[in-house]
Amino acid sequence: MIITKKKNLKDIESFIKEFNSFFLIGCSECATLCGTGDEDAILSFKEWLENQNKKVTGLMIAKTGCQILSTKRQLNEHKEAIDEAQCIVVLSCGAGTQTITEFFKEKPIIPLNDTLFIGNMRRLREFEEKCRACGECFLAITGICVVTLCPKSMLNGPCGGYKEGRCEVNPLRKCAWTIAYEILEKREFVERFYEDILGPKDWSKSNSPREFKER
Amino acid sequence: MSNLKKKLMNGDFVITVEVTPPRGPNITEMVNKLEELKKVVDAVNFTDNPSAKMRLCSMAACKISLDLDFEPVLQMTCRDRNRIGIQSDLLGAHALGIRNILVMTGDHPALGDHKEAKPVYDIDSSILVKLVNNLNNGLDINGNKLNGKTEFFCGAVVNPNAEPILPQLKRFEQKLKMGAEFFQTQMIFEIEKLERFIDYSKKFNTKVIAGIVMIRTKKMLHYIASKVPGVLIPKWLIDEVEKLKDEDVEKFGIDFACSIILSIIEKRLCDGIHIMAFSKVQEVKNLLNLIKIKT
């Protein structure tokens, strides 16, 4: 899922100070799992606005904020409340926020969250990045994603910076390549892996902006 | 052919020294050091923004050294340039007369003085060795023909201190296969760990230069132990240095480096040494004098 984190409200103040009426939009997918776009998050932000004598004209939780057409249909149901608001605050990821921007070019759209990464949830609201959507998956070879988990995206084994199996960048983490190497060993794949060299990687597959059409 | 390559191929024991280019435009001090060092060592190895801390570039330092008639080794990391920048810089370095290069992945910006910088790491050091080998064969990294061949003497790095060691040895082998002609090790504090690596590397026909550091102060020892990636200093050594009076540490450091070097020479472990003296010229001289006396 897409991991989001609520911005510091101090940083939001400068964006909202000139407006008096707001429409709030959350998302029932990732942002709900992150607690940044669910009903609680919206109501808590609503209360914060109202405590500053600002008006909330209405709210909506998009079923899937990154689905452009279905979100448009949902928005139509709230036309009046949206028209009444001077600006819209979106509690989702950056993708969901821009769905809204597509339909309201003239109205300020303010994101309440920062979008962090594609994440796996280990415990409730504890997220880890395991895949960075590089467009060229090596997991069949390395077991874990060394492009993501190694800060240097080493493709052919560890750098010389690890100490007792710990990463030079963050010693709290195991060196991704010591994990990948163990996997290669357990699968009896080490010799085969080193018969060849992996890369140079085709980074053009992750050059933004990307599009994909399954047609 | 570079003098360093000639000597290594002849089986001569080589001595190189590391110099970190200045942090700023004033090169006077560096030039003075080079004038002194060129009398006592075979080549000078210029670091490429070491520990991800911004410095004058290694290529310019190499050119300055060449002009002083002092053979340089250009260090090139994968941290700050993509494959276009690396190839372009290497061709430029070649045009300037630089022949020895030492390639490595490079310390991460998170450890340096520009922590917010975007790390590049477009390729890793194994690929970089392959890239240099391609240039030496008149090809770019994509295999497209260039208008000539470079004549680089390409070295790579290896860390015999690494735990676990196996993945490190595999990468050593891979760099060798990609065309690395010599290896420079991370700083050595335990001769046993160097021996463990040499036992493995002996199976292959390559040249190994051992990294030697001179401990100058207790602070420096702790800095290396905590901040230099991939270096584990044994506890007994830290304890021993801690017991010393501050003014005795420098002498201990030279004696200790000397004892490591003498073991390397006696046991014929390596083909040379690379002295990391953090640009302290006098200490390099003292160390080399001491080796002369003892050998």
Image (cartoon, rainbow, N blue to C red):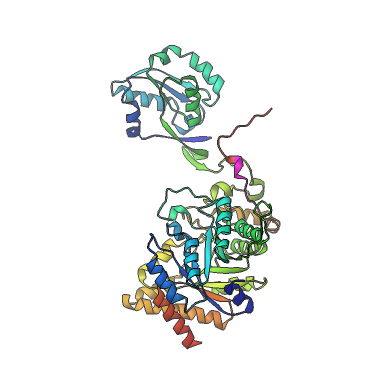
- Please state which of residues A33 and B85 is positioned toward the viewer in this rendering: B85
Eyeballing the image, is B28 above or below B57? below
**Is residue B19 found left or right of A55 in the rendered image?**
right
* B23 is higher (above) or lower (below) than B66: above
B152 lies above or below A11: below
Q: Which residues are magenta?
A: A198-205
Along the horizontal axis of the image, is A188 left or right of A86?
A: right
State which quarter of the image contains the C terminus of chain A: top right
Where residue B264 appears, x then y in whole percent?
54, 79
Who's the residue at 53% across and 64% down the image? B74
Q: Nearer the viewer, residue A210 or B36?
A: B36
| Relative image position of residue A181 (x, y in whole percent) | 61, 56
Q: Is residue B236 visible?
A: no
Which quadrant of the structure image shows residue A184?
Answer: bottom right
- The foreground one among A133 and B155 is B155
Q: Residue at x 39, y 34 (%)?
A: A7
Question: Magenta stretch containing residue A204, yes or no?
Answer: yes
Q: How many marks?
A: 0
Indicate the position of residue B240 as horizontal and vertical percent values: 39, 76
Name the residue furthest top.
A80
